[in-house]
Amino acid sequence: MRMGVFEPKREFSVDRSILDELSLDEVARKRTCTRGPSLKKRLRESVRCSLPRLKGWLFSWLPVLSWLPHYNIRENGLGDLIAGISVGIMHLPQGMAYALLASLPPVYGLYTSFYPVLVYFIFGTSKHISIGTFAVISIMIGSVAERLAPDANFIGNVTNGSSEGVVVDIAARDAYRVEIATSITLLSGIFQVLLGLVRFGFVVTYLSEPLVRGYTTGAATHVVVSQLKYLFGISPDRYGGPLSQIYILLDLFYRLPGTNIAILVVSLVSLAVLITVKELNSYYSKKLPLPIPIELIVIIGATVVSYYGNLNEIYDVHVVGEIPSGLVAPRVPNFTLFPSLVGEAFAIAVVGYAINISLGKTFGLKHGYKVDSNQELVALGLSNSVGSFFQCYSVTSSLSRSLIQESTGGKTQVAGAISALIVLVTVLKLGSLFEELPKAVLATIVFVNLKGMFKQYMDIPALWKSNKVDLLIWVVTCTCTILLNLDLGLAASIAFSLLTVIFRTQLPRYSLLGWVSGTELYLDTEAYEEAKELPGITIFRSSVTLYYANADLYREALEEKSEININKLLKRKKKQAAKQKRLQAKEEKAAKKERKRENGVLSISANETPGSVHRRGSKADLRKDSQCSNGCVNEGFEREPDEKTEDRVMEDAQSGRHSVILDLSTVSFVDTVTLKTLKNICRDFGEVDVTVYLAGCQVCVVQQLERGDFFSASIPKNHLFPSIHDAVLYCLNHTSKGLPSYDCALEVACVTQL
């Protein structure tokens, strides 16, 4: 009965013979394993060229050729135009703001919002993501730039009239930081391209969603700390390494009395306006045709106020400064910096790709198209590699811009190309207009755009309810990222995440299965009341695959659950065998003495008269009878109850369990340790008269068992069954060593008509 509708009871019936692995191969006509083509043939086939093959290769490496010639302007043109303009307007403030995160002049953020977008337009496979600057990648670039090019390396003495002072050569510092940023961008792009060429896109699967979200949340904390100096107008010392964020915060609190009030007012006003209008955009998102471009409005308004109010000179409000018009000529990055950037470059490559592919697959699943993970790796790598020659730093997709591109009607990457044109016009003609823009305004734009990342703290109560291990990964990742910095935090987080997988396989749920009456189902006896153990049969299952790390635990759990202590039973068996041997020796010795005595009696009887012998025997018989009548018992019979008691204990321990069925349906592969463990289990249980059967093995597992010479005369292949039910019926109908054949065998068989 569901939703008031009566559903008739559905039944099924199966009538077949009991199948073991050998009979299954015969019935199902198992295919013989055929070897694939030789390596020489595969190489010849891979280099073989034909027109369809060439066309497919071009479409694979240049996805733009597969869709741009068929672009429908009438269907997609208007939506892509509106989306491109909207995203382009967002690129301007975010590009300049995130450049500050990367410790670079703002104009380099505009360059980064132009060149890589065009490269991705050609090589990318996602139709909706917006490539460009991103807060997490920017802060990772900035941490490296500040580490290798700190202000202390560019301090010089300046004489102004009668006074002398110490200043930082900002031009030289920024130029060197640009070299660092472009070098690490090229190196990370090379990593991404190489990984994509070897089809290594699956590497992102090791970055689980809780890990990525915890990492980006921790990175958002780094972003906030790095922007506080612009909000308050103070200059804290630079710290690096573990716990650097704590040291920076302590230094900021120490310098708070020196806050520039004018900068703080500009920051607070900008924050208030940005937060208010963004909330209105969110609240009226369904009614507004386009979101209000409040970031661009705030930048324009703040630039006008700063220019006419002369805030830089009068109130010492830090501004962006000179923004050169036009595009810069290509320049080769500094290769000599590569050795000191390898670790950070690889971390940036992995994190950037993880964010990019997660967004791309989300939109692809929503709109019904495929995103090629390996081609995305190549596309992102080429975007970084090509962009590095044009003074760009590392890019990835932005969630906020991608959502705007989708919600405003964007259908293809034509929207991304249009947004790049908006940035190009700004760089060529409008860049110099923003020279008086306060840096505090850019910092507030960064703050407001981190709202989505800080909302990820709401993952904590959700994960607490759903999966506490994933919660632990999230918390550890976020904590390590905050305390250990971005590169070490990522490495520690990945290591911890992999350890949780290992721990899960070493702490599985071991269960005994019982038969549900009237079905062929065997369920956990602890979880289901109607699942009852069958007499004499133990059905054992592990919730995870069996491999070298948990093989010993599997053996111990099997003995504990089945209540069969192999070592104790073997000791009792050996003890019983030794006692039996001693009894046999004693009986042989007694028989030998008896034969000697009989021989002596016969010799005496030959010399004596029959009467004397009769009288002697009569006296002995009388003495024996009198002793027995007094209640004396022979010592040999006196020990017999103890022997029977011990035999009965041994018999109870064994006859209660004559068969053990191992459900191996969760096993996906067999290593040498697993093979040895299964052999030992079959051998040891067999020594105590308990037969072990295997059930539910996958084909690949059976093949690995065969290659490992698992099956032998002591472990025949007909002890391997395709299902637990087949194994149970076989056990109940083929009990050996005089063990009883239980009545439930007939009941089980009749119920399922096997």
Image (cartoon, grey):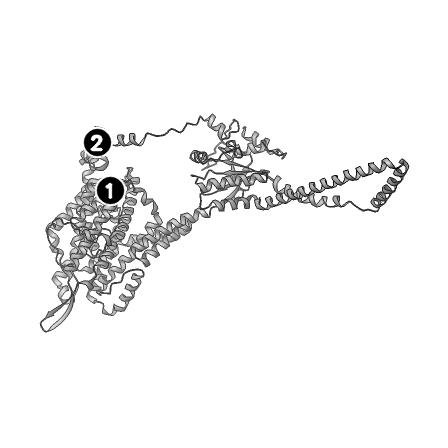
Residue underneath mark 2: 55
- Per the model, the C-alpha gap separating discs 2 and 1 is 19 Å
Name the spot of residue 188 as percent of width and height, x first: 24, 48
Task: Please tell me how crowded label 2 is: few (under 14), some (14-19), or many (20+) other residues with Cα within 10 Å.
Answer: few
Q: Is residue 128 visible?
A: no
Chain-order first, disc 2 or disc 1: 2
Question: Label 2 amino acid?
Answer: Lys
The local secondary structure at tag 2 comes to: helix
Q: As shown in the figure, which amino acid type bears the numbered disc 1?
A: Val
**Residue situated in front as seen by the camera: 417 or 645:** 645
Q: Is residue 118 above or below residue 699?
A: below
As rendered, which of 530 and 354 lies closer to the eye?
Answer: 354
* Image location of residue 212, percent across then percent down: 32, 50
Q: Is residue 135 above or below residue 583?
A: below
* Residue furthest to the right: 611
Q: Which mark is residue 378?
A: 1
